[in-house]
Image (spheres, grey):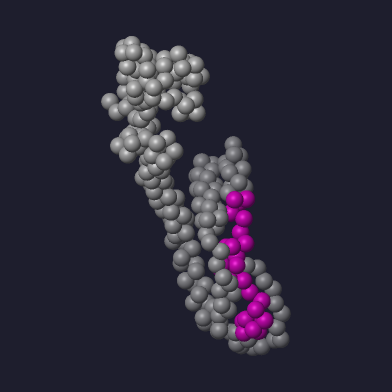
Amino acid sequence: MGASGWSYFVPYEADISAALQRLREDVFARGDYATAEDTIGAMDWEAAAKQNLEWAKNPELPPKTRESYLAAASDYRKRHWAQVLAPKQPPAPKPGSIDELLDHENEAAYQTRWSVGRPHASAMTRITKFITGGVVIVLLLPIFLATYYRGVRHYSLTDSLYSGFLGWTTDTSWAKGYSERNFAKVRVGMTQDEVRGIMGDPIWKPNPDYWGYTWSPSSTHYHQRGVVFSPSGSVTQIVKGFYFD
């Protein structure tokens, strides 16, 4: 039925073609044959590739022979990955006749011959899904970040959007020992001593009335945390958000 070795004994007939046809019918009826899918599916292409690579290492090989081994190894690697990435398929229905079997085998041989070197359809589908998923994540990540800063950090809507889309470009330095929990304890009306007792010393004081607990060394976008004092030294404003430069 194929290229695999086989040996059968049949009663003598003068008509060799008739004897061969009777043998074919008997083998087909018993299902004593392997299809192209059975043979290809059972192949260990990875092992075949490794074996060809080992043969190609022989220093006594002629260059053309070595090239043929390397080409075969590359071919087997492609078959291996096509086999690995191919989805599990239900068993194909048994052919109803010898002619149907032969037609199927010829078609399978043609498809196998022309599939070498081309990505398997299922592999392409998985690659496409992987790339699509990556693009979706990249597009949705800023929205997730903006939602986080809006809902958890209580930024304004504008600052939340800036944080989501530009947060990865920030250059924020934080005061020593800074914590969001302590910063949340600062209230309007507190004195400078009370603020210092909660937060410690600021990292940046551009003027006597502003204590910055964050700043940008490179003068670019940063997450802003600060306290504004009145001339008398009491808190008039708590600054929390995203500074866009």
Relative horizontal placement of residue 104, taking residue 168 as reference (left or right): right
Is residue 141 something that shows in the picture? Answer: no
Q: Which residues are magenta?
A: 24-48
Q: Magenta: predominant secondary structure element?
A: helix
Q: Position of residue 131 (x, y in %)?
A: 41, 49
Asked which quadrant contains residue 158, the reply is top left
Quarter of the figure that contains the C terminus: top left
Asked which quadrant contains residue 168, the reply is top left
Q: Is residue 38 magenta?
A: yes
Tell me if residue 245 comes above or below residue 15 in the rendering. above
Residue at coordinates 53% horizontally, 61% vertically from top-left? 87
Relative horizontal placement of residue 32, taking residue 157 as reference (left or right): right
Is residue 86 something that shows in the picture? Answer: yes
Q: Position of residue 45 (x, y in %)?
A: 58, 54
Q: Is residue 136 magenta?
A: no
Residue at coordinates 51% horizontally, 41% vertically from top-left? 63
Pick the front one: 232 or 134:
232
Residue at coordinates 56% horizontally, 64% vertically from top-left? 88
Residue at coordinates 37% horizontally, 32% vertically from top-left? 167
Asked which quadrant contains residue 195, the reply is top left
Tell me if residue 243 comes above or below residue 150 in the rendering. above
Q: Position of residue 73 (x, y in %)?
A: 54, 48
